[in-house]
């Protein structure tokens, strides 16, 4: 019978608890080249993420300031809410990568866990909002082609409610 003790090749519980939990090992002074490469990699990712965050912020402002206001067309509102996860994702990633670049390694375990949360929100929120938009477009095309009915465009409140339900 295999016990926990023999499974871990005789390691005691105290030895297992003392094992490091960081995702990336600390880089010592003897590996200055690796530290420089990590700093460069994190700095490049931070610059890219800051650039994308600025671009998505410009898109959000452009949608809000457009001549056809968001409130006049619910599909503009869907597009506005589609950009929000990308903006949150890139801002959070830029901050985390900047912290990592400053320290030359993973900043902390907490930041690593935070990265998982905003990655899930960025990808999941965007995917679900795309699915909602695709459903509305499907309803538009199906009713106009197959059923020869008029399509009732969702109201601004409907679009906002769909987005809030998806992001909750």
Image (cartoon, rainbow, N blue to C red):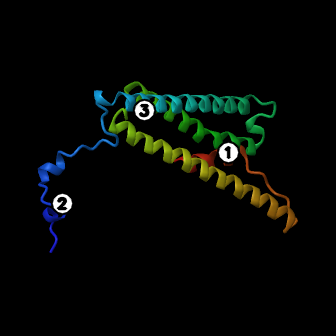
Left or right: where 44 falls relative to 136: left
Give x and y (percent) for residue 160: 64, 44
Residue under label 2, please give it. Answer: 8
Q: Nearer the viewer, residue 103 or 88?
A: 103
Q: Nearer the viewer, mark 3 or mark 2?
A: 3
Disc 1 crowd, CA 10 A, few/some/many (<14, 14-19, 20+) = few
Residue under label 3, please give it. Answer: 38
Farthest-out residue, top: 102
Label 2 to label 1: alpha-carbon separation = 57 Å
Element type at marker 3? Answer: helix
Residue shown at 64% from the left, 30% from the top: 57
Residue under label 1, please give it. Answer: 157
Residue shown at 60% from the left, 53% from the top: 128
Left or right: where 72 falls relative to 120: right
Give x and y (percent) for residue 88: 55, 36
Question: In the picture shown, does residue 4 fall above or below 85?
Answer: below
Is there CB contact under 8 Å for labels 3 and 1? no
Left or right: where 78 falls relative to 42: right
């Amino acid at each position: 019978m295999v016990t926990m003790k023999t499974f871990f090749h005789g390691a005691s519980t105290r030895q297992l608890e003392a094992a490091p939990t960081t995702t990336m090992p600390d880089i010592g002074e003897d590996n200055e080249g690796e530290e420089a490469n990590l700093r460069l990699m994190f700095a490049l990712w931070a610059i890219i993420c800051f650039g994308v965050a600025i671009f998505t912020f410009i898109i959000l402002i452009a949608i809000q300031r457009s001549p056809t206001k968001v409130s006049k067309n619910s599909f503009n509102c869907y597009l506005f809410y589609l950009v929000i996860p990308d903006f949150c994702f890139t801002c959070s990633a830029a901050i985390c990568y900047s912290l990592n670049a400053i320290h030359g390694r993973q900043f902390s375990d907490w930041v690593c866990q935070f990265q998982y949360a905003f990655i899930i929100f960025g990808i999941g929120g965007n995917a679900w909002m795309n699915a909602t938009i695709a459903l509305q477009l499907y309803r538009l095309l199906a009713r106009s082609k197959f059923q020869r009915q008029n399509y009732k465009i969702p109201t601004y409140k409907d679009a906002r409610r769909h987005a809030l339900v998806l992001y909750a």
